[in-house]
Amino acid sequence: MDFDLPEELRLLKDTVRKFVDRELIPLERECRPEGEDMPEQYIKPLQEKAKAIGLWLLDVPLYFRSFAAKRKSASRRPSRMPAAIRRE
């Protein structure tokens, strides 16, 4: 029986690990020594970095991610997507 991860999942695992090691852990040490909430000024840049490397909305099916991107660029009205899949 083969228990190795498929290549795609291995790449995802490596990408997540690098992101956590390089971006999150240093900020946690600096900003959250006692486990308090992350200061708001750090959250948006982290979100943008996660989007840039493909780690944003991983739990949302690709169809809804592309739908949300098109909807957001086509209109300034709030999305009518269910709150469970809407993230901004």
Image (cartoon, grey):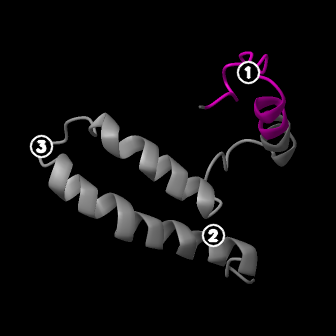
Question: Local crowd at mark 1 within 10 Å, few (<14), some, or many (≥20)?
Answer: few
Question: Which residue is denoted by mark 1 in the rendering?
Answer: 76
The kind of residue on which mark 3 rests is Glu
Q: Where does the magenta region start and end?
A: 68-87
Q: Residue at x 46, y 66 (%)?
A: 19
Q: Residue at x 45, y 73 (%)?
A: 18
Question: Residue 3 or 31: which is nearer the viewer?
Answer: 31
Q: Is residue 87 visible?
A: yes
- Residue 77 against residue 64 in the figure, above or below: above
- Residue 46 against residue 77 in the figure, above or below: below
Element marked by disc 1: loop
Element marked by disc 2: helix
Question: Local crowd at mark 2 within 10 Å, few (<14), some, or many (≥20)?
Answer: few
Magenta span has 3?
no
- Majority SS type along the magenta span: loop
Q: Mark 3 against mark 1, which lies toward the viewer?
A: 1
Q: CA distance from mark 1 to mark 2?
A: 33 Å
Residue 56, image x and y in percent?
A: 62, 50
Question: Residue 28 or 47: which is nearer the viewer?
Answer: 47
- Cβ–Cβ under 8 Å for marks 2 and 3: no
Question: Which residue is denoted by mark 3 in the rendering?
Answer: 34
57 sits left or right of 41 in the view: right
Quadrant assignment for the C terminus: top right
- Cβ–Cβ under 8 Å for marks 3 and 1: no
75 sits left or right of 54 in the view: right
Q: Earlier in the sequence, mark 3 or mark 1?
A: 3
Q: CA distance from mark 2 to mark 3?
A: 30 Å
Question: Residue 85 sits in which quadrant?
Answer: top right
Question: Which residue is denoted by mark 2 in the rendering?
Answer: 12
The kind of residue on which mark 1 rests is Arg
